[in-house]
Image (spheres, helix red, strand yellow):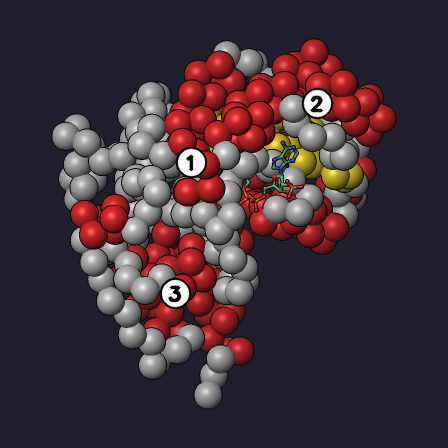
Amino acid sequence: MANQKQQKNLKFLIYGKTGMIGGMLGKLCEEQGIPFEYGKARLEDRSQLVSDITGVNPTHVFNAAGATGTPNVDWCEFNKLETIRSNVIGALNLADVCEEKGVLLLYFGTGCIFDYDSEHSMGSGVAFTEHDKSNYDGSFYSKTKGMLEDPLGEYNNICILRVRMPLLSDLNHPRNFIKKILGYEKVVNIPNSMTVLDELLPMAIEMAKRNCKGIWNFTNPGVITHNEVLELYKKYVDPGLTWTNFTLEEQRKVLAAPRCNNQLDSSKLKREFPELLGVKESVIKYVFEPNSKKFDP
Ligand SMILES: NC(=O)c1ccc[n+]([C@@H]2O[C@H](COP(=O)([O-])OP(=O)(O)OC[C@H]3O[C@@H](n4cnc5c(N)ncnc54)[C@H](OP(=O)(O)O)[C@@H]3O)[C@@H](O)[C@H]2O)c1
């Protein structure tokens, strides 16, 4: 009962209605009976943001809006001003308005601001923590996201969730990492931190209820390689799957901007949610097992 009453006292305002994360958040709120509305404003329009927040009077705001590019972040290389307006000016506008109104903002950022380096080398198990500063700006998308973290981190009313290579049970979603790599002619094979959205997005809602603040590596513990993901797909979904690998140097030639690879340290999130699964267990439980029934021959 107390819990139901608590939910009624919540009111979420969510930006990113048409997006993958924003869409999933809205569905979760419906399932959990949490009152919410989607923001109508474009993030770069401060006066519209003020009118949204005044009209909705939310307890929490979620920013799942940003320029991510279609079909991928290469788009940002050719649309730099639009990217700055959404990912820098817009994100700061919303943080600033929320600060003025005294509302907690949960911002979906990215872990794609780090790349393996000599101190955090691939396979060493030395992962980037929430204290590390961005070391990767090789793509314009990552550059805008990295340059944003410093000023955003100065606000006291913000919870920054660093998402990476999102995996979800909807295997047809074009922004699902699995759907993406299945569509490539050739794939690299690198261990990376990833976010199993079906497990972690409900935790984002719980973090709002707990009024969590600061920076959080919002990924499952451990790393998984491209080939491990594809092997699981083959085991659970399509036994006939085949694929071809290529090197990072070969990958670089088919992209407008290089991509980063990294391991993020998820121990802060694990301390908050001891039940958090390692990335391999999570992807099996939340993504592949639910899909294996549908594809059972
Ligand atoms: N690096 C990673 O691995 C990673 C992965 C996933 C998510 N993320 C971060 O998480 C956030 C959400 O990602 P997503 O995958 O859900 O993105 P998505 O599917 O591309 O959706 C982006 C959403 O943002 C909205 N939007 C873009 N610019 C806007 C603006 N200026 N004002 C208002 N709305 C705007 C879009 O609406 P319109 O269509 O109307 O423009 C859309 O609803 C992004 O900021 C992304 O960077 C990072």
For the residue pair 59 and 122, the one nearer the viewer reads as: 122
Could you tell me which residue is drawn at 61 percent across and 24 percent down? 90
Q: Which numbered disc flags the more N-terminal residue, 1 or 2? A: 2
Count the numbered circles shown. Answer: 3
Q: Quadrant of ligand 1?
A: top right
Of the 4 image quadrants, the one containing the N terminus is top right
Is 25 positioned to the left or the right of 1 in the image?
Answer: left
Query: Residue pushed farthest right?
Result: 55
Distance from disc 2 to disc 3, alpha carbons, whole Å, reads: 38 Å
Is 242 positioned to the left or the right of 98 in the image?
Answer: left
Q: Quadrant of residue 14?
A: top right
Distance from disc 1 to disc 2, alpha carbons, whole Å, reads: 23 Å
Name the residue tied to disc 1.
Answer: 77
* SS at circle 1: helix
Name the residue tied to disc 3.
Answer: 182
Front tag of 3 and 1: 1
Asked if residue 97 is positioned above or below residue 5 in the image, the reply reads above
